Image (cartoon, rainbow, N blue to C red):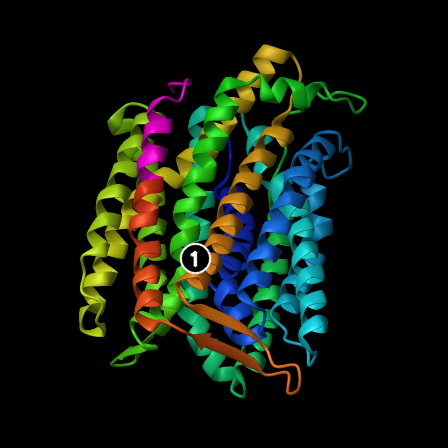
Amino acid sequence: MVSLKEKIGYALGDAAAGGITWKVMSIAFPLFFTNIFGLSVADTATLMLLARLLDVVTDPLMGSLADRTRSRWGTYRPWLILGAIPFGLIFALLLYTPDFGPVGKRIWAYSLYLMMMAVYTAVNVPYGSLLGVMTDDDNQKNQFSSFRMVGAYAMGFITMLAFPYVLKFAGGTEQHQYAVAGVILGIVAALMTLACGLLTKERLKPVMAESFSLRPFVDLVKNKPWIWLTTIGVCSNFFNGFRYAVAGYLMTYCMHGDVTVSWLIINYTVFMMFGEFTCMIFGGVSPVFTKWIGSKKMAFFWASVICVITSVAFFFIPMNPAYIWVMIAVVILTSVGIGLYSPLLWSMYADVADYATEKNGSSSTGLIFSSGTMAQKFGTAISGALVTMLLGIAGFASGTDEMTGETIVTITDEESVRQMVWAIFSLFPAAIATVMAYLVYKFPINK
């Protein structure tokens, strides 16, 4: 019998990775790098693209390495236990702005960002793989997956709500504010990751290959359900990635800064926080919704349709702070769909891992789940890179003054930038969700 404590412990893993580090990297990093740190649009886009090329190699290798790990803590848990401190430390350093010129800042940002991607892989790939060895009961897998999503969204809600108040509490320059936020969030992320490794159990023994070979990789590319699901995963993270990466620019340029309603400071993190709270609720409802629909893939399909409709609807809202609550209402409705399909993605990866084990006779759980993490990072970071490139095309430019070291932002066509931001938040995600709905409808495993 799986205890509630273990389910909460498992949820802490994604609360740290998805709810803190990845949430801040998704929503804050594009704006942070261009408007606060002082990277150019081209450098920001290149940085994210370069990291993705590295992930194409490191994620599958990490999955294969995790599958072959043996320790007194098990196969996958030691990576969380030993990786917790580096995970939080490097994240904190990423939000620190050194007093360097353009070249020094570029080296700092590239080095720390690539290190963060590496340690994220070393922690999160084994974390995802845990789902395949904690239980063989499909219903329990769905529950673990739902706890995971609720944990991520609950912590994301807390992180984004608290973010503007942490910045205000820190005081000083924007660079100082983000540095203090990095330290606080980095410590919390490290502690949660460690707790996840200590509170969970590995009940199943994966059928391991004793030595490294290329066979698991060959089997993987022949696995039709894996190909479909990885493509779906990339689309789901493109959908979220565009919205989160452009939210800061939406508040800055379309709303002309933060909107204050009574005591509530609605900055870009709080704006998206309403959706995070909705995702948390409907992530918990997802198993009931799936049972009502009759299958995971059809539940995923209808959740995607919700995202298409609401994303298109957002485009037609007037670009005016007076309509801020209408915008938030549509964000909430969109998040109903996201909350319903997010737990299903990881549960479906477990189904693909089971399919691969039955077909090939040995476990490649870590390798398969690593593709889910790779899809997450690929979709989020590529969308972030595309956001900065599209804004550059529309007339947005940023950089660091070589003499003073100060961040410089220039906009040659403000209306063009505003319209581009609005479309990136609405029409671009709508198109991606349409493709995602089609792909999941064709997914070959019907459970």
User: Is residue 340 something that shows in the picture?
Assistant: no
Q: Quadrant of residue 70?
A: top right
**Residue at x 52% of width, y 81% of height:** 174
**Residue at x 56% of width, y 41% of height:** 373
Q: Position of residue 362 (x, y in %)?
A: 67, 16
Q: Quadrant of residue 71?
A: top right
**Residue at x 59% of width, y 83% of height:** 406
Is residue 138 positioned above or below 397 on the image? above
Magenta segment includes 436: yes
Is residue 378 positioned above or below 323 on the image? above
Report the magenta stretch's main SS: helix
Of the pair 355 and 429, the residue shown nearer to us: 429
Q: Amino acid at mark 1?
A: Leu
The kind of secondary structure element at disc 1 is helix
Q: Position of residue 443 (x, y in %)?
A: 40, 22
Q: What residue sits right under mark 1 in the picture? A: 390
Residue stretch rendered in magenta on the structure: 433-447
Of the pair 311 and 170, the residue shown nearer to us: 311
